[in-house]
Amino acid sequence: MFKNFKNIDKVVYGRGAFSLIGEILASKRNSNDQFFVFIVDEYFRNKALISRIPLTEKDVLLFENVDRHEPTTEQIDFLRDEILKKHGLPAGVVGIGGGSIMDIAKAVSLMLTNEGSSTLYQGLNLIKKPGVYHLGVPTISGTGAECSSTAVLTGPVKKLGLKCEWTVFNQVILDPELI
């Protein structure tokens, strides 16, 4: 049996690779409403890393606390609705943190372009449209969420991933200084 699967489009790695994030995102900013949503682990709220994020005036910085629970369908739907209502459709989503943040970023990217609740898409190849550009910056090793084609979400009925070829990040930055 053989499986043909999509992988990450681009990976930049090495000490200091995070400093390239502004350059990487610059070419993507012309899409949609020309802003990025940065979803960052709450752990980094008052840390130096935040000052290194190349935020523009229109960008949205969201801190998510993933200590208490894994990502939920309700959380993803809420984030999607708030982003679209307050800001419009972003050029992309950037996730900075561990596996749960990676899953949140992937799921939000997909749900920004797919109607209805994320509970409708829990399963294999149920997503109808590709999401917006999404970039992952893992800060914890071991989960593999930065290279997985699944965004694991706990719903009201089941814990199951959004899984399709569009779930995979477009770009990943692997910087050992952050891990």
Image: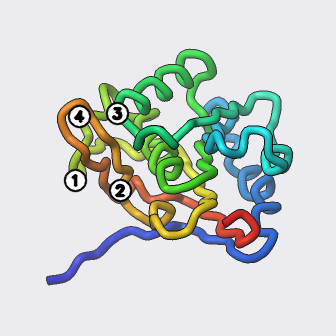
Sequence-wise, the earlier of marks 4 and 2 is 4
The three-letter code of the residue at mark 3 reads: Thr
Sequence-wise, the earlier of marks 3 and 2 is 3
Q: Residues within 10 Å of mark 1 (few under 14, many from 20)?
A: few
Q: Secondary structure at mark 4?
A: helix
Residue denoted by label 1: 124
Residue denoted by label 4: 120
Tag in front: 3 or 1: 3
Tag in front: 4 or 3: 3
- Residue at the extreme top of the image, as rendered: 85
Residue denoted by label 2: 150
Sequence-wise, the earlier of marks 4 and 3 is 3
The residue at 39%/68% (across/down) is 6
Which disc is residue 73 wearing? 3
Q: Is the Cβ of the residue at disc 4 closer than 8 Å to that at disc 3?
A: no
The residue at 53%/22% (across/down) is 84
Residue 171 image point, x, y percent: 59, 61
The three-letter code of the residue at mark 4 reads: Leu
Residue 8 image point, x, y percent: 50, 67
Q: Is residue 122 left or right of residue 27?
A: left
Q: Is residue 92 left or right of residue 146?
A: right
